[in-house]
C-alpha cells in the first residue's frame, strides 16, 4: 500500500495524448480495448497512422454515425467501426502474421501490473473461479516491435501497478518498453526504470513513494 | 457435375455424429453461422468439441448449443464477452471443459491443421501459465513454445457468396476464422447469403478456393444475433 495524497497528475485524455505524440508518422499501430482506444483521436496533425485490429482489418477508421453500424464491421472490442479508404480485410492467420511476424510497429495496452524488468500482467488476476480469457494479448506482446502500456499509476485501492515482480499471471516476459501513467512516463531498460517525464506537480521523490519498483532519474 | 449446394440446413448437418470436433467461424457475432448451429441443435449430436474464438451470447447460436448440453469441451481464446452467461455458468459448475488458447496461436493451430503441419514453435505465451507443460526450444537465442495443429471433423463457416464449386468470398471483418477453418476440417459446411453462377466471382478475388469446401447452404437473410439477444429470443424458438 502506498501513501494516498491529493496529487492527480495527467487526465486520461492527457495520458493518451502523450502516447499519441510518441507514435511516429507512418506507423502501423494496434490499440487495446479501453483507454488505449482514445489514442486514435489524438494523433498530431500531419501524421498518418494506420490502425490494425486483430479481428481482421488494417485501416480502421472512426466509429460510424448512429444508425450506420454494421455488425460485420467491428473491432477487437466487438464495437462497430469503419474502414478508411485504402483499408484491407484479412483472415486471422494473416492478422496474427502481421502481429507475430513483427510487422506492427506499436501496440498500446492497458495493464494490471508492469514489473521493472518489463514483465506484463494484463489478462487475469488468477482468482479462483474466474473465467480465464486471453484473446490476442499474448500474441501482441510477443510480436509487436514496441509495447506501450497506458494505465493509472496505482490501483483504485492505492497499490502500485509498477512492481518489482508481477504477482498476477503474466501476459509476457520482458515485453514492455514504456509506461504512461497519470503521474509519469517511464522507460523500461536493461538498466532498470528511467523516468522520462513527470506530470505537473509531481516530484521524483513523490513518484517513488507511489511506485513499488525502484525508479531512476 | 460438381454442385456443392445442399437444399436445406437439415441436409447440411445430417451426418454430424456424437463426439465430433466442429470448428465454428466468427468473432463475436461477426461471421457466426447461426442458422447452421441452430440446424445442429435440431439434429441432436452431442458430446461435441467446439473450436471457436468465443462461446456465444444470449441463448442463440453457439450459446444455445452449449445451453442444450451438447458441448463437452470448448477450445477458444475469449470465453466471456458481453451477454455471454451460458458458458460461464456451466464452467463454474464444472460441467464444461475449456482449453484456453491465445487468439493468434488458435489461428495458427488451425492454419497448421489445414496445411498438413503437425506442430510449430511460437514466441506467444512463453513465460506465462499457458505455456506450462508444453515443450519449448531456443532458436537464435529466443525461447519458443511448441503448439500442436488442430483439425476437425466438420467446420461451420459463414461467408457472403459462393458458386457451385464452393469458391467463397466473405464480408468485411466477418471473414475472421472462416478461411482457415475451411482448410482444417474433413467436411466444411458454409452458409452464404448469395449463390452465384460459376465465373461471377473474380478468380483474383476469391478468398477460399472451392477445394476447401464440401457443402454450401443458402441463407439469404441470416439472423442478426444482437437483435435476437435484444429481443430475449432463445433457440429453439
Image: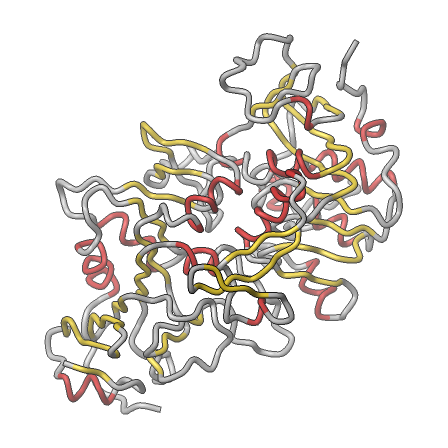
Where, by quadrant of the figure, is residue A33 drawn?
bottom left
Q: Relative to residue B178, is residue A155 depicted above or below?
A: below
Where, by quadrant of the figure, is residue B12 drawn?
top right
Q: Give the residue displayed 69% in from the left and 48% down from the top.
A: B150
Residue at the farthest front position: B140
Task: Provide residue A55's location: percent of width, then percent of height.
Answer: 49, 44
Where, by quadrant of the figure, is residue B2 drawn?
top right
Q: Give the residue displayed 85% in from the left and 27% down from the top.
A: B11
Colour scheme shown: secondary structure
Task: Provide residue B54's location: percent of width, then percent of height.
Answer: 62, 51
Q: Relative to residue B153, is residue A201 depicted above or below?
A: below
Q: Give the residue displayed 37% in from the left and 54% down from the top.
A: A144
Task: Provide residue A173's location: percent of width, then percent of height.
Answer: 43, 70
Please name whichever residue, B134 or A207, is drawn nearer the observer in this view of the structure. Answer: B134
Please name whichever residue, B81 or A212, is drawn nearer the observer in this view of the structure. Answer: A212
Q: Is residue A160 left or right of residue B50?
A: left
Q: Is residue B83 left or right of residue A106?
A: right
Q: Is residue B50 left or right of residue B54?
A: right
Task: Provide residue B167's location: percent of width, then percent of height.
Answer: 63, 20
Q: Relative to residue B17, is residue B219 depicted above or below?
A: above
| Total count of labels | 0
Position of the N terminus of chain A by quadrant: bottom left
Position of the C terminus of chain A by quadrant: bottom left
Amino acid at each position: 500500500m502506498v501513501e494516498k495524497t491529493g496529487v492527480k497528475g495527467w487526465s486520461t485524455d492527457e495520458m493518451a495524448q502523450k502516447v499519441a505524440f510518441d507514435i511516429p508518422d507512418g506507423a502501423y499501430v494496434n490499440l487495446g480495448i479501453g483507454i488505449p482506444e482514445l489514442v486514435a483521436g489524438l494523433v498530431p496533425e500531419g501524421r498518418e497512422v494506420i490502425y490494425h485490429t486483430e479481428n481482421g482489418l488494417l485501416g480502421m477508421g472512426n466509429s460510424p454515425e448512429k444508425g450506420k453500424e454494421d455488425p460485420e464491421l467491428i473491432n477487437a472490442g466487438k464495437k462497430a467501426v469503419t474502414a478508411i479508404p485504402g483499408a484491407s480485410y484479412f483472415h486471422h492467420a494473416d492478422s496474427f502474421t502481421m502481429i507475430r511476424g513483427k510487422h506492427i510497429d506499436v501496440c498500446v495496452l492497458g495493464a494490471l501490473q508492469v514489473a521493472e524488468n518489463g514483465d506484463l500482467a494484463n489478462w487475469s488476476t488468477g482468482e479462483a473461479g474466474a473465467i480465464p480469457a486471453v484473446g490476442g494479448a499474448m500474441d501482441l506482446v510477443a510480436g509487436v516491435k514496441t509495447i506501450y502500456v497506458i494505465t493509472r499509476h496505482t490501483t483504485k485501492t492505492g497499490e502500485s501497478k509498477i512492481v518489482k515482480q508481477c504477482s498476477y499471471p503474466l501476459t509476457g516476459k520482458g515485453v514492455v518498453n514504456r509506461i504512461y501513467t497519470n503521474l509519469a512516463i517511464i522507460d523500461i531498460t536493461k538498466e532498470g526504470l528511467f523516468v522520462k517525464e513527470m506530470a505537473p506537480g509531481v516530484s521524483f521523490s513523490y513518484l517513488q513513494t507511489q511506485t513499488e519498483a525502484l525508479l531512476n532519474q | 457435375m460438381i454442385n456443392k449446394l445442399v437444399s436445406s440446413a437439415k441436409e447440411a448437418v445430417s451426418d454430424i455424429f456424437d463426439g465430433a470436433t466442429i470448428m465454428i467461424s466468427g468473432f463475436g457475432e461477426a461471421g457466426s453461422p447461426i442458422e447452421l448451429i441452430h440446424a445442429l441443435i435440431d439434429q441432436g449430436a452431442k458430446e461435441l468439441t467446439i473450436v471457436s474464438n468465443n462461446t456465444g451470447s444470449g441463448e442463440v447460436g453457439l450459446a444455445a448449443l452449449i445451453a442444450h448440453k451438447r458441448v463437452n469441451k470448448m477450445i477458444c481464446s475469449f470465453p466471456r464477452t458481453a451477454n455471454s452467461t451460458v458458458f460461464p455458468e456451466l464452467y463454474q459448475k464444472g460441467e464444461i471443459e475449456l482449453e484456453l488458447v491465445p487468439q493468434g496461436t488458435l489461428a495458427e493451430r488451425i492454419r497448421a491443421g489445414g496445411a498438413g503441419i503437425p506442430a510449430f514453435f511460437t514466441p506467444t505465451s512463453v513465460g506465462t501459465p499457458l505455456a506450462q507443460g508444453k515443450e519449448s526450444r531456443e532458436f537464435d537465442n529466443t525461447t519458443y513454445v511448441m503448439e500442436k495443429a488442430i483439425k476437425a471433423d466438420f467446420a461451420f463457416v459463414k461467408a457472403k457468396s459462393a458458386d457451385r464449386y464452393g469458391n467463397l468470398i466473405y464480408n468485411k471483418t466477418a471473414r475472421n476464422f472462416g478461411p482457415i477453418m475451411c482448410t482444417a476440417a474433413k467436411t466444411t459446411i458454409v452458409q452464404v447469403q448469395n449463390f452465384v453462377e460459376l465465373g461471377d466471382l473474380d478468380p483474383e478475388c476469391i478468398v477460399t478456393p472451392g477445394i476447401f469446401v464440401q457443402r454450401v447452404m443458402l441463407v439469404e437473410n441470416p439472423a442478426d444475433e444482437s437483435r435476437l439477444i435484444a429481443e430475449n429470443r432463445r433457440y429453439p424458438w
